[in-house]
Image (cartoon, rainbow, N blue to C red):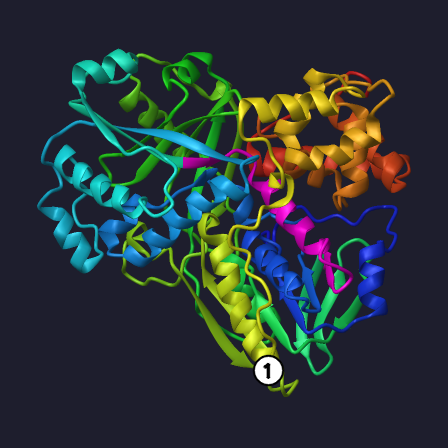
Amino acid sequence: MSPTTSMKHPSPSARTRAEVAALRDRPTAEVVIVGGGINGIATFRDLALQGVDVVLVERDDFVSGASSASSHMIHGGIRYLENGEFRLVHESVRERNALLRIAPHYVKPLRTTVPIFSTFSGILSAPLRFLTHRQGRPTERGAALIKAGLTIYDAFSRDGGNVPRHRFLGRRRSLAELPALNPDLKYTATYYDASMHDPERLALDVLHDGLAAGAHARAANHLEAVGLGAGGVRVRDGVTGEEFDLAADVVVNTTGPWTDLTNARLGRETMFMGGTKGSHIVLDNDELLAATGGREIFFEHEDGRIVLIYPLKGRVMVGTTDLEHDMRTPAVCTEEEVDYFFDLVAHVFPGIRVDRSQIVFRFSGVRPLPRHDDTQPGFVSRDYRIERADVAERPGTTLLSLVGGKWTTFRALAEHLSDEVLGLIGRSRIRSTEGLAIGGGVGYPTTDDARLVWIVGHGDGVGRERAEVLLDRYGTRAEALVRAIEDRPESPLRGAADYSREEIAWIARTERVVHLSDLVLRRTSLAFTGAVTAALLDELADIVGDELGWDGPARRAEAEAVRRVLAERHGVALAEPASL
């Protein structure tokens, strides 16, 4: 669920969408889920696969809040070992390994290297942190401590593990592999986690799986829960302003760091959450990209924060911070955080210059952490729990609030939360999602030979090169797009030739796009990679407008709204197109 201060603008066309009309015409369900981040979407999918009559509502776009501001990693959480969270690490590693198998189109092995500048640093303070969860004086972890942690981490990976074990190198061999690293280092440790290069698209695949389960599974974005009373959950259409009630036996609040604010709107005051802000910048710097050697550089800065330098989509993402945040204000990447990131890069790659002119995108989100009082942010549990409350205004209805959770464990979390819901409505689980391929991961070719077969088989109508691009972008869900555009010439976008007009129209038509920002920020990588220009926005507004019935003023308003959110939330200032 996205922040209360996110871009809000009714479409000038202001027409009721089919999915909202369907909810209004049948405003009952066994379960209503409020919040369309990854955990809400995954719970929706799980319940839909059990045959439960379930509705998902999201006040902004799907995956537009905390879930879209991740570090693009699926990881076991090696640092959680120091917190003593062995159950969470075991579950996270197991789910990481599973996602490599069930979502291979978006989740890939990620080689990760840790530069180490001392041998024994932190070895005395680590037990104190383990026992008290108070950080104390920041101390960079040395080789002995990191070696011990990685050995335990490898042990957790044995069950179904499909990534190599860690390895240590001394200074000479480390610099031979990555010559741009700081020559003052003593060792490097390299291990494997997993990358998630398109988190928003992975979440959309999970959503589509739920919707495909049948007419009993319904979902709508830009539909806000504004109250809870005798009639059920009161919702308001963000496009038309229309309000109506959705009656349900169970209401599930999966709005992440906004959980307390959502409960307040539902008439329940809670103090469950204590999220922290994490920011990232995306750099267009070929020298830095080459210096990473295609691997993530992951380390602890001298202030105790875990940070990363991560090659992604031909750019380099640098993050992240871990700062206290008030959820009543928008999370944005500040200039102080940018300076901090530049200091990090200089510490690891001292010979490479980075500056603000190379930043093509900034983003910031809030982790859905539980309230933690005086516990240091880095030591707050990343585990999750479920809070239950009765709804006095509607006897027999139960409100569940999800506290915590992270991307890596979304499938297991959703199964746990769904089991809680099934118990409340007197239903039994009929299938598990464990091992069940997600979206475009179904039948995804994971060997070179299988990949060639797929590309040849789908390249007749669009060409083999184009078929390969679409396979990488959508997994095997690309088959539907290939069928829609084959045997006719595509028209590349003037402002982004790797997308075509036909592809953008297909996305707008089939992927619940309501506003232009949905497409620019979450259905494509255009904003993340710095490809957006004002002229491209106008081009996209015309294509999407043709599909959604926007008139001229609506198209201009949609493009202007994206320009505004890029400037205010992502540090991207676009010049006006030459035609204006």
Q: Nearer the viewer, residue 553 or 478?
A: 478
Whether residue 469 can be seen here = no
Kindly identify which residue carries mark 1: 391
Seen in the picture, residue 374 relative to 245 is either above or below; the reply is above
Seen in the picture, residue 386 relative to 221 is either above or below; the reply is below
- Rendered location of residue 23, percent (x, y): 80, 65
Q: Which residue is pictured at 58% across the width and 55% down the height?
A: 42
Q: Which residue is pictured at 62% across the width and 55% down the height?
A: 36
- Rendered location of residue 330, percent (x, y): 54, 48
Task: For label 1, count other residues whose C-alpha is less than 10 Å away and answer few (under 14), some (14-19) or many (20+).
Answer: many
Q: Which residue is pictured at 29% across the width and 40% down the height?
A: 305
The amino acid type, in three-letter code, at marker 1 is Val
Apparent side of residue 160 relative to residue 139 in the rendered image (left or right):
right
Asked whether 219 falls inside the magenta stretch, the response is yes
Apparent side of residue 19 relative to residue 307 in the rendered image (left or right):
right
- Rendered location of residue 368, percent (x, y): 46, 56
Q: Nearer the viewer, residue 105 or 376?
A: 105
Q: Nearer the viewer, residue 423 or 332?
A: 423
Q: Which residues are magenta?
A: 194-221
Query: What is the quadrant of residue 28 in the picture?
Result: bottom right
